[in-house]
Every structure is written in structure tokens, then in C-alpha cells.
Amino acid sequence: MTKCDKCHSRSIIHQRYSGMRLCHTHFQEDVRRKVREDLRKTGLFGHGARVALGLDGRWGSAVLLQIMTDIFSRRKDIDFVAITVVEGEEGTPHRDHAFDQARLLAERLSVRHIVAPLDFGARPSEVSGCRDLDDLKMKRLMNEARAEGASILATGHSLDSVAGAIFLKLLQGDVDGLFQRQDREAQLHHIEPLQRIPEREMRLYALQCDLLPANSKGQDQNRSCQDDLHQQVRRHLGSFDSRHPGTNYSLLRSLERIHLLRDDNASGAKPLSDDRK
């Protein structure tokens, strides 16, 4: 029996990127620690806030909702609202599955739940691929969050998803796209508290906490999305990370460093007249 590196209990996971073997208890503590640290780094929870949570019936959003509501369970000044963006006609399997999973979890955790139908507009033909659809969903989610008076929007993107997005933006030379979406006018901050949690750990956490059925689709994408460029990048990056553990974390740290450099430049810039003094 392989033992946990922090106690003598049986380990359930080996984190190749850290070298740690963790038991059930210490694995959950590790996940929650990473989420707490990321939430603290945002600096957004020093006072009261209404937080909108994107709840799509998948593992990531389920883990996000459970951990955040638990962390802030004693904070009466933090208010949560879960928002599910649904696509397709009512009665279609994909829509009903996502809605049912989200509704049941929100009820279980006593969080107010809102369903926001996705409106393709007058020209649905413009939705040419999964990335366009994802962008529409995010815009709908942000609009609903603003309508609810939320100052923070949290989504359950995993390390794999965030690292894949970073890598794709770098390949495309889209530097502006590396920075988080933020509605400056309405002060809606978009955060990703699970960005340091690998997808396999996210799934394990969800199953351990019975957040979704074992046969749930979880983070799997629709079949029509398998050829999307973003998915191809994630597959290749995932393969590389499996051979070189820690690659995804390196990409995330690179983005954090870029943010720090940008902030330093913005705060440290001086007028030319001051430089001559």
C-alpha cells in the first residue's frame, strides 16, 4: 500500500508535478488551499460582494460552487447566485442534462439559481464554431451577472483549460487576449479560482464529494467540438504535460509574470520631465 506523504493513510493520488502522494483528506485540503490562495490574491473579498458563479452542470463549476460556498459560509456579507446558460430548444438531451445537474446542485447547497437562455440573435449562422459559441455563452453569463448586481463573476476553468487558452493566445500573437475579461464600466471582475487545479484532480474531487454522478460528462466537450483548434491545442499540451509534468503550471506562472510586469510598468511610468531631474 502506497502511503500519503503527510500521514500514514493510503494515498489516492500521485501529483507528478509536485512529487507528492496524498490521501483522501490531504488531497482535498490541497485543492482547497490552492483555491483559497487564488481568492486571496484577487483582493476582491476584503468587503461584502455579490458573486455570480457560472454553473454549467460540469465538474469544474460543481467544484467551484461547493468550495466557494463553504469557504465563505460564515461571511454574511458575501452573497452568491448561480447562473446556468442553456443552449438549444427545451427538451433536448444536452440542455436538459446540464440544467438538471446545475439545478440539483444549487438546491443541495442552498444557492439561488438562475437559468439564462442563450440567444443566438437574428443571424445564428454567424456562430461558426465552438469558440464563437463559448464567447456567446460568456457574454450571456456576464450580462446576467451584471443584471443581478454582481461585482464578481467566477467560472470553474481548470488548469488544463487556462493553460490551453494561454498557449493558444501566444500562438496567435494575441497579447491583449492574455488578460482577463473585465467590464470596467460596470466593475464586473472575472476570476478563475480553480486555475491551479488540474482537470484530473478536479474530477477526483467532484467524485469524492459526490458533486456529480460518476457517469456525468463532466468536463467533456460536445462531439462537434472535438476538431476545434482550442481542443487540439489542449490535447497536444496535455500530452506534453504528461511527459514533462509541470508544463501547464509553467504557462500559468508565465501569465502571472506578464501581469506583474504590466502592473509595474503602469505604476512606475514617469513623465519625461521628471526623468531629467
Image (spheres, rainbow, N blue to C red):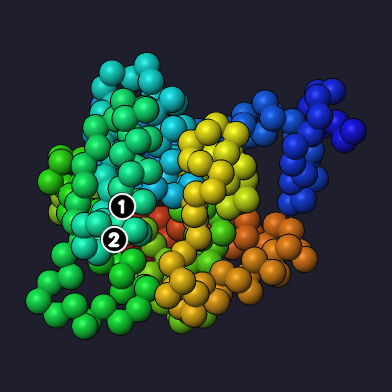
Image mark for residue 92: 2
Residue at 43 percent across and 67 percent down: it is 222
Compared across the picture, whether 8 is left or right of 251 comes to right
Q: Quadrant of the C terminus?
A: bottom left
Residue at 37 percent across and 16 percent down: it is 74
Q: What amino acid type is highlighted by mark number 1? A: Asp
Residue 152 at least partly seen:
no
Residue 115 at least partly seen:
yes
Q: Is residue 186 above or below residue 11?
A: below
Residue beneath label 1, please?
A: 96
Q: Quadrant of the N terminus?
A: top right
Q: Residue 84: horizontal and vertical position, in percent?
A: 28, 48
Q: Nearer the viewer, residue 42 or 262?
A: 42
Q: CA distance from mark 2 to mark 1?
A: 6 Å
- Mark count: 2
Q: Are marks 2 and 1 in contact (CB under 8 Å)?
A: yes
Compared across the picture, whether 241 is left or right of 173 comes to right
Residue at 26 percent across and 28 percent down: it is 79
Residue at 36 percent across and 73 percent down: it is 131
Image mark for residue 139: none
Q: Is residue 234 above or below residue 62?
A: below
Q: What amino acid type is highlighted by mark number 2? A: Thr
